[in-house]
Amino acid sequence: MEKVKVKNPIVELDGDEMARVMWKMIKEKLILPYLDIQLVYFDLGIKKRDETDDQITIEAAKAIKKYGVGVKCATITPDAERVKEYNLKKAWKSPNATIRAYLDGTVFRKPIMVKNVPPLVKRWKKPIIIGRHAYGDIYNAVEAKVEGPAEVELVVRNKENKTLLVHKFEGNGVVMAMHNLEKSIRSFAQSCINYAISEKVDIWFATKDTISKVYHAYFKDIFQEEVDKRKEELEKAGVNYRYMLIDDAAAQILRSEGGMLWACMNYEGDIMSDMIASGFGSLGLMTSVLVSPDGVYEFEAAHGTVRRHYYRYLKGEKTSTNPTASIFAWTGAIRKRGELDGTPEVCEFADKLEKAVINTIESGVITKDLQPFTEPPIDKYVTLEEFIDEVKKNLEKLL
Ligand SMILES: NC(=O)C1=CN([C@@H]2O[C@H](COP(=O)(O)OP(=O)(O)OC[C@H]3O[C@@H](n4cnc5c(N)ncnc54)[C@H](OP(=O)(O)O)[C@@H]3O)[C@@H](O)[C@H]2O)C=CC1
Ligand SMILES: O=C(O)CCC(=O)C(=O)O
Ligand SMILES: [Mn+2]
């Protein structure tokens, strides 16, 4: 079979643990045998980041900006425990935070729905898409332990020269300062509006502006201004905009039928995307794409490195990890590359690979995470490798 030629390169960011094991299998079995593609490869595995003092992450972000399309495997963000485990020089920053801060933009996360895994929340009929602001907040915060007694102030040096008292500490404590940018929040709102108009879904946006009367209210006001600017277009597309408090939104979403874009600030989006993914069946069924304001795209799975499975894999166990979201990261990147290059045959390959995955699950060949939720019930599940081999068989039927 002749390979499909991909005109321009895709930037590939390798990762860690079980996600890395899946990544290699996907690439070797489902991508490289069928595509003639140049991959600009960066190893973002924790050892390489440590070796390069994390410079490789910056280089990878620059390459995504240069080539326009990237695909990323999940990576470890080290904490104190990981520093010991991998004997690291330090607890490096999250590579996701670094890349997202560099590219800016919005992360859209959409669950993959399959017929034989109905959502755990019975009322959910349509996908709930998370639009997660990708810049700032706790991901680019400055924080410190405070040895008391101490006085902590926030100083703003500009025309006004403001000094705000954070707290007078009598004993020990902790402090954090976060920031965000008007430009980035505006482009987040604009990306969400563009997405909602193109997909004809309502927009829900929620913060806690009753408590955070400046920070959260800033997001609320800017979002509203951007919505007001596009009022006619939104009306024409039949897209409604709803603003709510975040706790209200969390409760309402469970009682809804789905089918909306839920725009979230960075931290809320991180949490809610995993909850929504699980509610639709599994973290292994949640896609994720970063859309930057300059038209640059980074595709990934929403889940992490699946650490618990990796330790079992290291002991020689054949795990039943779900590679669907990682496969869809590849297909998302391949389809986008085809769209940007004007090569429909490349997009067609991506469509067929996605179809092969859905056909595999709907034919009853599933990984363990889906098994408790299948309807009609399926009592058997396969290993990661068996699942990928079945996808390959189904893909070959479609090619
Ligand atoms: N985008 C990224 O790069 C991200 C990286 N991380 C990093 O990942 C590492 C591990 O984080 P962790 O908290 O374990 O989060 P994970 O999302 O990796 O996994 C949490 C649990 O969810 C289930 N799960 C997740 N993905 C799958 C899948 N594809 N198939 C089957 N089950 C799945 C597993 O549950 P069970 O064990 O019950 O089977 C798993 O143990 C951390 O070091 C963290 O820094 C975390 C999030 C995102
Ligand atoms: O970068 C990280 O450490 C976590 C990222 C994450 O959880 C996510 O992208 O949802
Ligand atoms: Mn997360």
Image (spheres, rainbow, N blue to C red):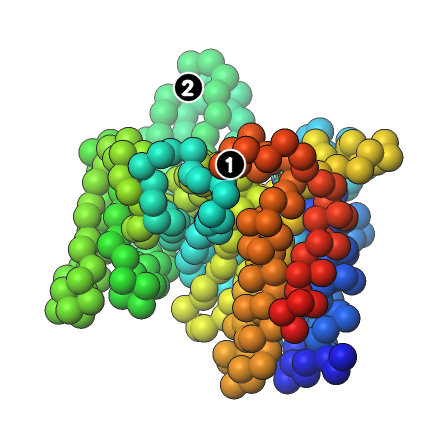
Do the numbered discs 2 and 1 sit on residues whose CB atoms are within 8 Å?
no
- For residue 126, say whether it is visible: yes
Q: Can you tell which of label 2 and label 1 is closer to the viewer?
A: 1
Q: Position of residue 221 (x, y in %)?
A: 20, 51
Q: Residue at x 75, y 69 (%)?
A: 32
Q: Is residue 27 above or below residue 211?
A: below
On residue 92, the disc is: none
- Work out whether 395 lies above or below 138: below
Q: Nearer the viewer, residue 384 or 237?
A: 384
Quarter holding the C terminus? bottom right
Crowding around mark 1 (Cα neighbors within 10 Å: few <14, some 14 to 19, many 20+) is few
Distance between mark 2 and mark 1 Cα atoms: 59 Å
Left/right placement of residue 9 relative to residue 289 reads: right
Which comes before the other along the chain, label 2 or label 1?
2
In the picture of the structure, the residue carrying the numbered disc 1 is 376
Give the quarter of the image for residue 321: top right
Secondary structure under the numbered disc 1 in the rendered image? loop
Residue 390 position, x and y percent, is 71, 54
Viewer-proximal residue, 43 or 109? Answer: 109
Name the secondary structure under disc 2.
strand
Amino acid identity at mark 1: Pro
Furthest residue in direction right, as rendered: 316
Disc 2 crowd rating (10 Å Cα; few below 14, some 14-19, many 20+) is some
Residue 156 seen in the current view = no
Q: Amino acid at mark 2?
A: Phe
Q: Residue at x 41, y 68 (%)?
A: 293
Toward the top, the furthest residue is 171
Dot label at residue 169 = 2
